[in-house]
Amino acid sequence: METSLTDIKKQYEKLKNLMGDKEAFDLSDEDALRCQDALSLLKSRNYILDASTLCEKRYIKAAEWDGFEDWLDEMIKESKRLSRRECTIAIVSAVIGAAIGLIPTIIGALC
């Protein structure tokens, strides 16, 4: 099951509140599990470093998160644009399908 970008944004906001102004932060297993998608994305984009051990989930801030938030907002906007485009294509396809479906009726009425 794929997590939506808006869910990742919520996870990110939670992490941001948990972290505050600290350079390193610890998470409970429960918080780490709830925010795993945002953590994974932050790690892959090199905004945090994983310094976890067997006993604790610890992360170190490697860069300011403002750029990540801007990027995430842009990705959310882009996914919404894509959804509108897909919706437009579906409506146009339905209209074309209805028109094609009416052709036999029109031909039958003319003959």
Image: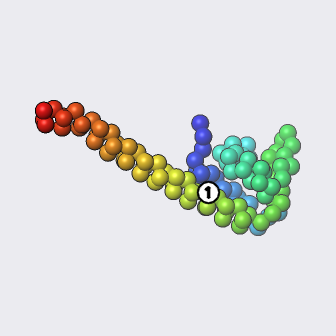
Q: Position of residue 32 (x, y in %)?
A: 72, 46
Numbered marks: total: 1
Left or right of 106? Residue 28 is right
- Identified at 29% across, 38% down, the residue is 100
Can you identify the residue that label 1 sits on?
75
- Identified at 58% across, 47% down, the residue is 4
Left or right of 44? Residue 108 is left
Q: How is the image coloured?
A: rainbow
Q: Position of residue 62 (x, y in %)?
A: 83, 60
Left or right of 79? Residue 40 is right
**Of the pair 49 and 15, the residue shown nearer to us:** 49
Identify the element where label 1 is drawn.
helix
Q: Position of residue 66 (x, y in %)?
A: 71, 67
100, above or below 17, in the image: above
| Residue density around tag 1, few if under 14, some if 14–19, many if 20 or more, within 10 Å | some
- Identified at 18% across, 38% down, the residue is 106
Q: Mark 1 is on which residue type?
A: Met
**Of the pair 72 and 14, the residue shown nearer to us:** 72
Q: Residue furthest front?
A: 111
Residue 7 visible in the picture: yes
**Of the pair 58 and 47, the residue shown nearer to us:** 47
**Of the pair 31 and 45, the residue shown nearer to us:** 45
- Identified at 68% across, 50% down, the residue is 38
Q: Position of residue 52 (x, y in %)?
A: 84, 46
Residue 17 visible in the picture: no
User: Which quadrant holds the C terminus?
Assistant: top left
Q: Quadrant of residue 1?
A: top right
